Amino acid sequence: MKHWMTSLAAAMALLVTSGLYAADGDAADAKDDDKKAPKTIAQLTENHVSTPGLLTVYQDEKTGAIKLHINKSLLDQELVYFAQAADGVVQTGYFRGAYLANDVIVLRRRFDRIDIVKRNTSYYFDPDNALSRAADANISDALVASEKILAEDAQTGAVLINADKLFTSESLLQIKPSPDPDADPKAFSLGKLADDKSRVLRFRSYPQNTDIEVEYVYGNAAPTGATGNDITDNRYVAVRVLHSLIAMPDNDYQPRFDDPRVGYFMDTVTDLTQYSATPFRDMINRWHLVKKNPDAPVSDPVEPITFWIENTTPLEWRELIRSAALNWNQSFAKAGFSNAIVIKVQPDDAQWDAGDIRYNVLRWTSSPNPPFGGYGPSFSNPRTGQILGADIMLEYSFLNRYAFARQILSRGGELLADAPASLVAGEFCSLAHGLHSESQVARGLAIGADGDGAAFEAQLVHDSMHYLILHEIGHTLGLNHNMKATQLRSPAEAFDPDALDGGVLAGSIMDYPAVNFAPEGATQTVFYSTRPGPYDDWAIQFGYDPSLDDPVRREALLARSTEAALAFGNDADDMRSAGKGIDPRVNIYDMTNDAIGYADARMQMIADALGKLPSKPPAAGESYQQTHDVFVQMMRSWSRSAAAVSRFVGGVYVNRAMVGQPGAEPPYTAVDVATQRRAMQVLAERVFAPDVLDPALPALRFVAQQRRGFNFFANPEDPKVHDTLLVVQGAALDHLLHPNVLKRLTDSALYGNEYALTEAVDALTDAVFAADARGNVNTARQNLQVNYVERLADIVKGGAYDNVSQSAAILALQGIESLGKRKRGINRSTEAHVAHLQLLIDRALDDD
């Protein structure tokens, strides 16, 4: 043993002498040891540009690669993650200013890696309840990314990670949509994400937030589907996204919980420790307004809500925009705040741009394919509902006369669409599309009323711009739509200047109204409301009045919801789509508390105006494009009016009041039988009658689009009048014969409806067949009758239709068959039509 130890000591001495081994753990060779020692943060960020802030960003001056320096204080702390589209093209579903994500994330260290975890904020556990110990059970957070720690500061605990892959991949945000199994396989779609082309474009970092803008490039060597001129080369399509990481606000903000009687956007939270039928802790989205003088009834806020008018805004519009936005201060005064909203203009030499989330900006674009005319999103802290920032996107298309839906008439397309269907998933306000269309209708009605002129145009632009700004600002304050607000005025009041109370035409500015064009003999008042209505004042008070932290005072305010001026119903209730919603008062492009009478008068005005189109041509030297566009928008308005009337058939009035609330009615009350019969009669006369298109016939020779290169290569240019008329009629039939409506006629009979399903179907059949039951049938009417019989045949097949509906359809088909057998002395066209109907009926009723 002694000999072995002596030999080992000698060997060690030799190794030390040769430099191959270091005594006491010191490096035997400094050069070799340097290669093995981990590099420091300073070493790894040499030749990098540093941008300090919430997260310090380092960018390699040579390669552009970025790294993130994360202070230890941020680890395991929640941050708000927000993403918006900085730029894109509408066909991809991404466009400038679109809000894409609003989440809570955590940067969590796990050994030698940083995990990026997206938290689930949908549930609440009372910390005083023992169940809170199981708060993580069966609720999944999302581990969206994990990055290896490159270096660590031993003294501060700060770490450094690579960030290129984190941001240029779709880890934080899925951009390319998942495949839709029902989509047209030949339709255009984004290709594969190109890693070598996607890159970080720019970044900025501040004490409370870090923003990183990334361009994602998608490549497809052999793309399918048509694209517009806004896509330069459809093999390579780019989407720019701004990712923002924001420090969780540290303030005394108190959440205010939602109530179904008033409409706010909200962060939805379910309390899993509450024993209740409604265990909801839904927090409304609102700004953090605090009074400078808490004891004053009305006080300026410590920090107002400041909006900047982008310097792209034409000079002539800036004052109008400013004055419209500041009208909201009237509502805030009722909530105890003066000068709650401040409007400034972005200087031309500003060192910030509208994408900077620290600034709330009214932004302008002029897009080849506008996704909206106005869009007012905001983003919030999902933990509290506090709004952290907002923008208002405005499209120049809202104001010009150019019709972006040029092909509607030539292809008999969908007349009711107001926004492209290709938008990314989410809720977008399409008001401005409707305002643009309705303003075009007003111009057409003015031609028919000999009222077009400079004063008319100036008021129309003023009122529509005022309305749009007020509406979109309302969204940024947290308000969602109120599609019941146009019920405020009677038809007489709508054209009575003394009754409009300074421009308040509807209960809320948050509705989608029909343009208020005066019929012959009436006074033209405002085309649209020009200041917030009584519902808006009440809703802002609910959201912002500090005194309503007292639950007794809050409930006293909410108890007023049964007042007619405070009527509320949002997109969840509205009946814009066939079969959707049940309350006909909650609708778009209607007006007054007699929506049927108002729509009836509108359809008569449209008929009169169409008849005068040939005598009111465009100016000498111009094409007939303006005539075409007016005709298209008139047909669209006619369809909207017909839709508004149709919703009363099978309708049920909805009341949102709580149990025991003063003035409360039962939640459901069927529309009275007289109103349903009246609606069906108006449709029979204005939509289904044989002569409904007669006033427009003289104009058809002039409904021509201006030629532009080969713009008629794909579709012939002649107006598809029969198709277009059938779209109008079909939109009404879509609702009247929808399985939901037919079932509701039967169901609601058990709680008050007196308009029987068989009576409704009989009345509809008469509207389609009775007027020409014994004579010849014109071609437009033939289209309608075939379409109607085909719909009845579909009902007979069953599917979504119940037995009662099938029975009514069978009886109607048998009645139509007997009408055909009674025809005598008809022309050849009608004879062929009767044979066609008989064949359809035979197939529908065939026992086999």
Image: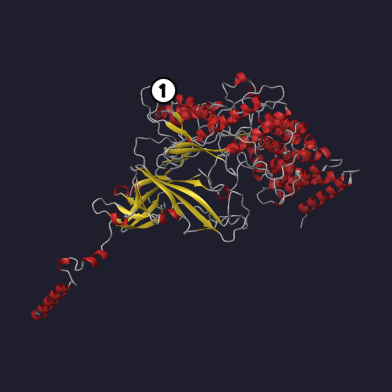
Q: Which residue is at the front of the view, 252 or 240? A: 240
Quadrant where the N terminus is found in the figure? bottom left
Residue 459, horizontal then vertical, whole percent: 62, 26
What residue lies at 78% left-to-right and 47% top-to-bottom? 786
Quadrant where the C terminus is found in the figure? bottom right
Residue at the far right in the pictured view? 825
How is the structure coloured here? secondary structure
Q: Is residue 40 above or below residue 301?
A: below
Q: Quadrant of residue 302?
A: top left
Q: Is residue 435 above or below residue 189?
A: above
Residue 544, horizontal then vertical, whole percent: 43, 30
Q: Quadrant of residue 303?
A: top left
Q: Which residue is at the front of the view, 36 or 555? A: 36
Q: Which residue is at the front of the view, 190 or 735? A: 190
Q: Determine if residue 282 is in view.
A: yes
Residue 106, horizontal then vertical, whole percent: 37, 49
10 Å crowding of disc 1: few (<14), some (14-19), many (20+): some
- Is 740 on the left or on the right of 338, as rendered? right
Residue at the far bottom in the pictured view? 3
Q: Disc 1 on helix, strand or loop?
A: loop
Identify residue for label 1. 298
- Is 206 on the left or on the right of 555, as rendered? left
Q: Quadrant of residue 641?
A: top right
Q: Which residue is at the front of the view, 597 or 18? A: 18
What residue lies at 47% left-to-right and 26% top-to-bottom? 329
* Residue kind at label 1, given as amino acid type: Val
